[in-house]
Image: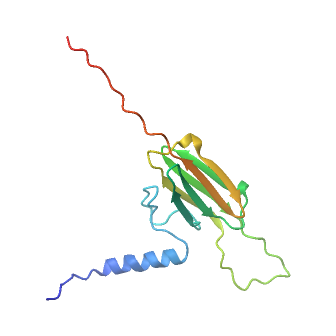
Amino acid sequence: MANITRWNPLNELDDLMSRYNRLFGLTRGNEESGENDLFSSSDWIPVVDIKETPEAFTIEAELPGMSKEDVKVTVQNGVLSIQGERKHEEDTDDEKQHRIERFYGSFLRRFTLPENVDEDSIKANFKDGVLSLKLAKAEPAEPKSIEVDVQ
């Protein structure tokens, strides 16, 4: 017996738009920050790897062609933000550009941090176009026992 599914053309249009946006480095909304804008304010989105060890989380972001002065990392209210801008090379009169495939402009990535991250111990390193962030895990809080005085 075959299952019958109702066809919704709007779902297909939404899927098509998502594919188009990913192809050109645009996003619909920003899942990390909870924003529901139609398009995010980023011109491009650097890719990241997130790894976990028993002691820490590591986030590595690929930022080719950028320097550490072009990147800003902040933590506020349990949200880690990585933002910056990759500037376009200036055109010269003796140079024709046949194809531009690299993304330029501003970017913003946000990540909600787990509760067990020690926000005061975040360390950043930038080398060879890769931003590495090490987020140490906090020691679990010991439960406090409160003695109740009965009268």
Way the structure is coloured: rainbow
Seen in the picture, residue 90 relative to 124 is either above or below; the reply is below
Residue occupying the far bottom of the picture:
1
Who's the residue at 59% across and 55% down the image?
82
Q: Quadrant of the C terminus?
A: top left
Q: Position of residue 39 (x, y in %)?
A: 48, 66
Q: Position of residue 50 (x, y in %)?
A: 53, 60
Who's the residue at 35% across and 81% down the image?
12
Q: Position of residue 37 (x, y in %)?
A: 45, 62
Seen in the picture, residue 26 relative to 130 is either above or below; the reply is below
**Viewer-proximal residue, 138 or 59?**
138
Q: Position of residue 97 (x, y in %)?
A: 75, 83
Seen in the picture, residue 89 relative to 143 is either above or below; the reply is below
Q: Quadrant of the N terminus?
A: bottom left
Residue occupying the far left of the picture:
1
Residue occupying the far front of the picture:
54
Lateral position of residue 142 relative to residue 84, left or right: left
Query: Quadrant of the rendered structure where residue 109 is?
Result: bottom right
**Viewer-proximal residue, 77 or 52?**
52
The mark total stands at: 0
Lateral position of residue 144 relative to residue 57, left or right: left
